[in-house]
Image (cartoon, grey):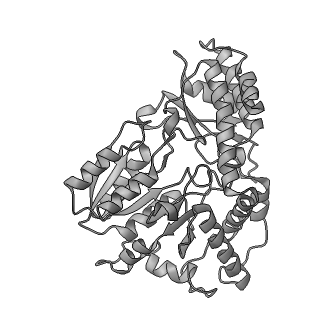
Amino acid sequence: MTVKSFHPPVRTLMGPGPSDVSPRVLGAMARPTLGHLDPMFVGMMDEVKAMLQYAFQTKNELTMAVSAPGSAGMETCFVNLVEPGDKVIVCQNGVFGGRMKENVERCGATPIMVMDDWGKPVDPNKVEAALKANPDAKVVAFVHAETSTGAQSDAQTLVKLAHDYDCLTIVDAVTSLAGTPLKMDEWEIDAIYSGTQKCLSCVPGISPVSFGDRAIERIKNRKTTVQSWFMDMNLVMAYWGGAGKRAYHHTAAVNTLYALHESLVMLQEEGLENSWARHARNHQALKAGIEAMGLRFVVDEAYRLPQLNSVTLPEGIDEAAVRSALLNDYSLEIGAGLGALAGKIWRIGLMGFASNEKNVLNCLGALDAVLSGMNAQINSGVAVRAAKQAFAK
């Protein structure tokens, strides 16, 4: 078999991630590769660290980019802060809370589950009840922005609760970073992880993480060795920490870190608050179009993520057939439901570079055309106009 170079088609990525990558970021990846201990690269790492501190709104010294996707950022937080025999309060209101549970179990610890319906935020009252019933719990873990549903939980309240009961917090911010307000220091979050492929407009494959002082103290005073050599912060601190000097730990994803650097430069240029406002503005226009068509959102407006929109199907419509038509006829990708919502919803992403007026209007127009062609029970021909009116406001 003769294999030729791969040339992917141009898609518009409006699913749950990855999202569209800025041409500036793609261009940055094509720059000459440096050695991962080259002084020029070390200087760039310092800039990445400073810009991640800005994105997370933290002064944490241990703020860095794990050379692996967001799932590895999750595992990094758990393997460093959870030891065998610990009890961990795990909040689950979607797929990714379930993955937290699996990480706790693989660390040899016991997950104490706080369950909420998919599409609902984590209920602080249930969390407090679990903390009262388990006074020996060490950590509270929850997803700030649940990608499987588009529901956002009150991170500040949940963190305060955890601290009131002397627990550390691990927060999943994979979908929230740069897309919706997130203030690590102000909310006193202990450990946090995210991904580059969502609201940062970057390629997949890097996971920003940050550990606060309480978390670092816990890591330094562990009774057992961190089960993962690669993710052991005691070792990685010497690579990402220090005053410009780096101890060899692993070969960093050099060109992918160029991409992250460029995406963070773009975030600084736009301004973090402006990025939050852009995602909110584009959501409001999408919402106007979706509701004009007669479709509904899964998540109540008070808890709804602007960057990840879960939308119900018209009766009798095959959601996979709609997604296939959008991909084949319009080169537009939206996402399917996961878990309990599989086959019942679409997930429409408005993240990072993909969160713009053109994409909102194109998505609504294409969705309207495909559903009308399937004789779906919708209000045809009104969605784009409604979105334009929302933008005009």
- 210 versus 338 height, above or below: below
Q: Quadrant of the C terminus?
A: top right
Identify the residue at image location x=29%, y=61%. 165
In the displayed structure image, the side of residue 323 where residue 100 appears, left or right: left
Q: Quadrant of residue 13?
A: top right
Q: Position of residue 173 (x, y in %)?
A: 51, 55
Q: Nearer the viewer, residue 188 or 136?
A: 188
Visible residue check, residue 327: yes
Q: Quadrant of residue 86?
A: bottom left
Q: Nearer the viewer, residue 249 or 144?
A: 144
Q: Position of residue 376 (x, y in %)?
A: 60, 14
Q: Position of residue 72 (x, y in %)?
A: 49, 62
Visible residue check, residue 35: no
In the displayed structure image, the side of residue 246 where residue 108 appears, left or right: left
Q: Quadrant of residue 360?
A: top right
In the displayed structure image, the side of residue 268 where residue 79 appears, left or right: left
Identify the residue at image location x=21%, y=57%. 134
- 266 versus 356 height, above or below: below
Q: Nearer the viewer, residue 203 or 4?
A: 203
